[in-house]
Image: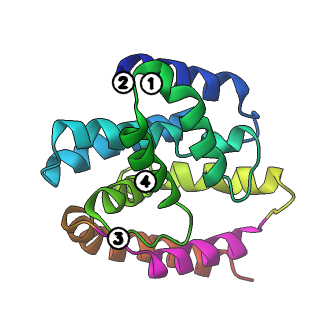
Amino acid sequence: MDYQSAEKMILQQLREQLPPTYFFHNWEHTADVVAAVARLASECGCSERETVLLKTAALCHDTGYLRRYERNEALGVEFARRYLPQFGYGEPELTEIETLILSTEFPYHPQRLLEKVLCDADLFYILTDRFAERANRFRRELAGRQMPLDDVAWQELETKFLHKITYYTDYCRNLYRQLKPLRLAALEKICRSTQP
């Protein structure tokens, strides 16, 4: 499997072909998920082969956005099956990558370790100091899709999201346990300050 060449091609397609109004679901998000997958795979003791499959699934998991915004995971699978064979991915790898991509359909229901790693990586931005910036990018993306939210509605939505979120690996669960009160306190403070 020639992962490096696949990564170069896929990130270039996302960079060049995704609409500019995809402020969150863009090539940078994909690159962030790939980086998070590599980190979590190491933390979880994944093999080298498993890590390559995870990184490849992370590369492809949002390629469906190239064709459709909603319910795009199946399109990501089609993308993977169309392009990855030219980089040496065979049917066993494509089947595994398909399962991984489909596990990222929200709400998540991962069953196996690799699925849990990919789902956690998809939301890893919440565990970084880029949380506020990434959340605001998503808000701008929704506004561009005719779903604008005022400050109060946005903060309430984010607060509910943080209350509901589940991480599946021990590493992310432990990290989120530490960060969740800080994230919620900041959001609730903003909610109170913007209410009339």
Q: Is residue 5 magenta?
A: no
User: How many residues crowd around disc 4 within 10 Å: few (fewer than 14), some, or many (20 or more)?
Assistant: many
Examine the rendered structure and indicate whether residue 127 appears above or below residue 46.
Answer: below
Q: Is residue 127 left or right of residue 192?
A: left
Q: Amino acid at mark 2?
A: Tyr
3D distance between C-alphas at marks 4 and 1: 17 Å
Instruction: Nearest to the eye among marks 4 and 1: give it.
Output: 4
Q: Amino acid at mark 3?
A: Gln
- The total number of labels drawn is 4
Residue occupied by mark 2: 3
**Mark 1: secondary structure:** helix
- Nearest to the observer: residue 149 or residue 50: 50
**Mark 3: secondary structure:** loop
3D distance between C-alphas at marks 3 and 4: 10 Å
- Nearest to the observer: residue 61 or residue 150: 61
3D distance between C-alphas at marks 2 and 3: 25 Å
Q: What's the magenta bit mostly, secondary-structure-wise?
A: helix
Pointer 1 or 3: first along the chain: 1
Q: Which mark is residue 100?
A: 4
Furthest-left residue in view?
Answer: 45
Instruction: Nearest to the eye among marks 2 and 1: give it.
Output: 2
Q: Position of residue 85 (x, y in %)?
A: 48, 26
Residue occupied by mark 1: 7
- Nearest to the observer: residue 137 or residue 121: 121
Pointer 4 or 2: first along the chain: 2
Q: Which mark is residue 111?
A: 3
Figure quadrant of residue 78: top right
Mark 2 and mark 1 residues within 8 Å of each other at the beta carbon: yes
3D distance between C-alphas at marks 1 and 3: 26 Å
Examine the rendered structure and indicate whether residue 85 appears above or below residue 64.
Answer: above
